[in-house]
Image (cartoon, rainbow, N blue to C red):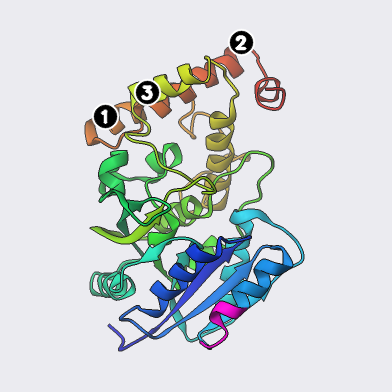
Amino acid sequence: MQSKEKIGIVLATYNPQVEYFQKQIQSIQNQTWDNWVCHIVDDCSKLEYQAEIQKIVENDSRFICHSHNDNLKSYHNFERGLQYCVEDSTITAIAFSDQDDIWQPEKLKILITKLRSEQLLLVHSDLELINSHDHTINPSTWNFEGRNPEKATAELLLLRNVFTGCSLLFCTSLITYILPFPQQNEIVWHHDLWVALVAIQKGKIGHIRQSLVRYRIHSSNTVGVRQDVGKFYVELMAWLSQKCRITGKSYLIHRNLSKAFYTRFQHELGLSWSDPFDDQRLDFGLGILKLCYQSWLNKYGSEGIALRILILKFLFDIRKIKPSDLFFNR
């Protein structure tokens, strides 16, 4: 491993709660791996928040603040942050950071040591769940949600994401394939899922069953967690709690993301059709049952999601219901 190579950190902000943001910054400053630069990419926060961000990091030159007048939302704001890392040729690996978590002091050192010692493209870790008062909710997000990321394949990732952005570290060589992020419309997925898909397609992934991030759960989270998410009974209970309402949103997310993934990598996947968006190739026909079985066999935990998508596929294709009839008019 190169001695003290430089890590680029992309910290995306939007009207951060100051107390949480200060703790996140302190935890980055307390990293035992101290050769890093942190690009704070602000997504058009209110001026008072921008001033607070500047004030908190003003005495540490390793933090570089970028304020923007256009609000791109989280997904494209992280993409914008990657562009700043591209401009620095001394950065060899990249980490994402949220604005309200707490990193364990050894986080970067453990991640980059595994990344280099095993010649990985991407590595990620488990996370400890904490509440707004820093109290532990659960010591393991992976156990709480029933994640088995070691079993992930590109096809299973398209069903269910088991990678959390703030736990990732990946090689800068991936940026060529990651950028540009696929465009989205009203139906969105998150930056960490796209990066994980690209990494699992291009090379070897590492998994660390140690909680290196104290992942904060509170009312303003962009992404939350659910116990045993993706399993049959959880998906059924979630549907019942919504009074059996069907929006079609989950189907559209998986369909659009799959189209973006297979379009980006169609040549190396050996796809020869003129339109790479082929429903059978995307496993949204009866092939979804095969993925459901694989998920169950490998304890990946996405069987409920697979069946939900199969049902929506039936509604959209067999009954000729348009996704827009369900989602946009919900």
Provide the residue designation for mark 1. Answer: 296
Mark identifier at residue 144? none
Residue at 49 percent across and 29 percent down: it is 280
Tell whether position 56 is magenta.
Answer: yes
Q: What kind of residue is marked 2?
A: Arg
CA gap, disc 3 and disc 1 = 11 Å
Residue wearing tag 2:
319
Give the magenta range. 55-60
Q: Residue at x 58, y 46 (%)?
A: 260
Q: Against 310, is 282 above or below?
A: below
- Which disc is residue 289 wearing? 3
Gap between marks 2 and 3 measured at Cα = 20 Å
Residue 161 sits in quarter: top left
Location of residue 284 in the rendering, given as x and y in whole percent from the top left corner: 49, 28
SS category of the residue bearing label 3: helix
Secondary element type, mark 2: loop
- Residue type at numbered disc 1: Trp
First in sequence: mark 2 or mark 3? Answer: 3
